[in-house]
Image (spheres, rainbow, N blue to C red):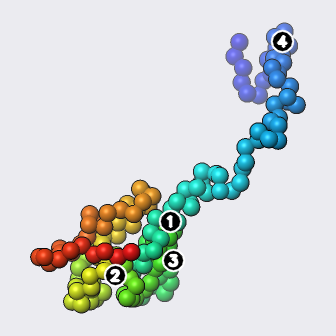
Amino acid sequence: AVYSPNTTPPSSQPALAPLISPSSTAMPATLAPSLSPSSTVSAALSEAKAQVLAGCTVTFSGVIPTNEPHPQSHPLWRLALSLGAQVTADLLPRTTHLISAHLHTQKVAECLQRRVHNVWILHPDWLFYCRWSLSRAMEATFMINALPAGSAYPVPV
């Protein structure tokens, strides 16, 4: 016989009785798992994500249009914030990471001319990789500028 979800089985077949009564399945209060918000997977991932770039100050250059009325709504800005970074529109002394798609921007030129040694100049893919890996990616992998001979990698944070 073929049954569809809308039909009931013939009454000649015995109904299956529950193997365990509903009242016997309740766990004692001492064994019930704690379901606090921080114990859920999504909350744990959110907490981990918010710590990835803690202590970093990110500035964007040539990535968010300068005529953008609300740069805080740009996806890259929001991504950096969600990873725990502070984000600034201007290059500041506390900036640790300058995110740019190319070297030909005013902020990149300013970093290179002043020979700012504590700022990583990185491709935006660095942020995506940090999000994907839930860890701070190696900055040297995502640098868009070559280091001058004899220079060391920046050591911010």
Residue type at mark 1 is: Gln
The residue wearing badge 2 is: 61
Helix, strand or loop for disc 3: helix
**Alpha-carbon span between mark 4 and mark 1:** 58 Å
Q: Quadrant of the C terminus?
A: bottom left
Q: Distance between the residues labelled 1 and 2?
A: 24 Å
Nearer to us: label 3 or label 2: 2
**Callout 2 secondary element:** strand
Sooner in the amino-acid sequence: mark 1 or mark 2:
1
Tell which circle, 4 or 1, labels the residue nearer the N-terminal end. Answer: 4
Q: Number of callouts in the render?
A: 4
> On the image, numbered disc 1 is attached to which residue?
51
In contact (CB < 8 Å): disc 3 and disc 2: no
Closer to the chain start, of discs 4 and 2, is 4
Give the percent coordinates (x, y) of residue 27: 80, 36
As drawn, which residue projects farthest toward the top? 12
Whichever of labels 1 and 3 marks the residue nearer the N terminus, that label is 1
* x and y percentages locating residue 109 in the rendered image: 24, 87
How far apart are labels 4 and 3 at the CA level? 61 Å
The reply to whether residue 150 is visible in this rendering is: yes
Question: Of discs 4 and 2, which sits in the foreground?
Answer: 2
Identify the residue at image location x=69%, y=16%: 2
Residue on which the image places disc 4: 14
Q: Which mark is residue 73?
A: 3
Sooner in the amino-acid sequence: mark 4 or mark 3: 4
Residue 75 seen from this side: no
The N terminus lies in which quarter of the figure?
A: top right
Q: Is residue 17 or residue 26 the one in the foreground?
A: 26
Residue 41 spot, x, y in % from top left: 60, 51
In the image, taking residue 16 as reference, residue 155 lies left or right, namely: left
Q: Tell me what residue is drawn at x 35 percent, y 76 percent.
A: 156
Dot 3 amino acid type: Ser
